[in-house]
Amino acid sequence: MQTNKILSLLGMARRAGALAAGHDAAVNAVCSGRARLIVLCCDLSERAKRDMRIVAGRHEPKPPVEEIPVTMAQLEASCGIRAGILAVQNQDMATGLLSLIQS
C-alpha cells in the first residue's frame, strides 16, 4: 500500500471540496447518495468502523468501505483533517484511492 500517495490524494480531494470529514458528515454523504468511497483510519474504534459499514450497506448506492494504514494524527499532519472517517464524494478520486488502497 502506498501511504504517501493515499494521503496526497486525500489532501487533493479536501482541497477540491470532494471530501466529507467526520462521522456525521460521512453519514450525511452516504444517506444523500453523494459518497463514492468511505475511508476509515486504522486507529478508529471498532464500534465506529462497524457502524459506518452498517450505514454504508443500508443506502444506495452502496459505497465501498476501506480501512487505510494511517492514524488520525498522521492524517491531520498531512492533510489538516482531524477525523477518522472520510467520505470521498468524487467518483474519479474514489476510483484512484480505491486502486491505491487495494494495491
Image (cartoon, rainbow, N blue to C red):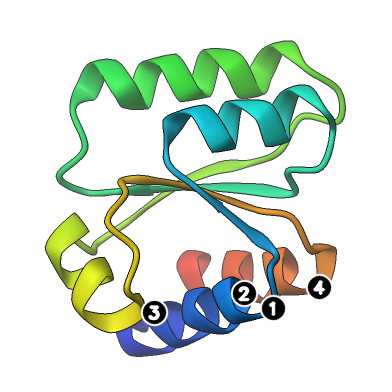
Residue 14 drawn at (x, y percent): 56, 72
- The answer for how far apart the CA atoms under marks 3 and 1 are is 14 Å
Residue 71 drawn at (x, y percent): 17, 59
* Residue count near mark 3 (Cα–Cα under 10 Å), binned few <14, some 14–19, many ≥20: many
Write down the residue under mark 1.
16
- Badges 4 and 2: C-beta atoms under 8 Å apart? no
The quadrant in which residue 63 appears is top right
User: What amino acid is found at the position of numbered circle 4 in the picture?
Assistant: Asp
- Badges 4 and 3: C-beta atoms under 8 Å apart? no
Write down the residue under mark 2.
13
Residue drawn at x 28%, y 82% is: 78
Taking 59 as reference, is 3 above or below it? below
- Badges 1 and 2: C-beta atoms under 8 Å apart? yes
**Mark 1 element type:** loop
First along the sequence among labels 4 and 2? 2
Residue drawn at x 62%, y 74% is: 13
- The answer for how far apart the CA atoms under marks 1 and 4 are is 12 Å
- The answer for how far apart the CA atoms under marks 4 and 2 are is 10 Å
First along the sequence among labels 3 and 1? 3
